[in-house]
Amino acid sequence: MNSSGKRPGDSAVTMTELVLPNDANPLGNILGGKVMHLMDIAGAIAASRHCNRPVVTVYVDGISFQEPIRVGEVVVLEATVTWTGNTSMEVMIKVYGEDLTSGTRRHTNTAYFTFVALDDEGKPTRVPPLIVESDEEIRQFKEATIRREERLKRRARAKLG
């Protein structure tokens, strides 16, 4: 573990993939499951870069698909660590559809994934703290803290019910 911490940009990921016909539904739009798969990969890479350890996905906040991405377009994913705890990290993943013929890019969805770092025995292990400096990084960190508190409340309610 790097006890001195890391900045969000140190582990940021940009991933691109061309949407092919076998990635699409009958309407010619990328399958939602394919987008979620790509989001999980981009998020896991960002989390692993942050802690230099293997990670597992433990939680995904709601994913809403605002716009389709069509066959022949490019899916662009941007993943950034927004919060760290003792062993877990939240990663914000933004997804864009890019039309290669016009060069236009549109935001299609954003989701937050939580990952836990694992040691050599597959047990949770500590992660470096996140160094937030800009106003935007501080805002994202605070919002991530609120999302974490809400997840913990939901988990506690689920155990009671």
Image: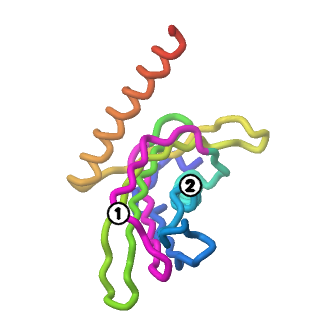
**SS of the residue at dot 2?**
helix
Q: Residue at x 51, y 57 (%)?
A: 32
**Residue situated in front as seen by the camera: 80 or 155:** 155
In percent of width and height, residue 149 lies at 38, 27
In percent of width and height, residue 97 lies at 39, 72
> Would you call the spot at circle 1 few (<14 residues within 10 Å), some (14-19), or many (20 or more)?
few
In percent of width and height, residue 19 lies at 53, 76
Name the residue that disc number 1 marks.
67
Magenta residues (range)? 57-83
**SS of the residue at dot 1?**
loop
Mark 1 residue type: Glu
Q: Does residue 161 appear left or right of residue 118 in this picture?
A: left
Residue at the farthest front position: 26
Mark 2 residue type: Asp
Q: Gap between marks 2 and 1, in whole Å?
A: 19 Å
Q: Compared with residue 18, is residue 111 higher up or lower down, i.e. above or below?
A: above
Determine which quarter of the picture holds residue 105: bottom left
Q: Does residue 141 appear left or right of residue 123 in this picture?
A: left
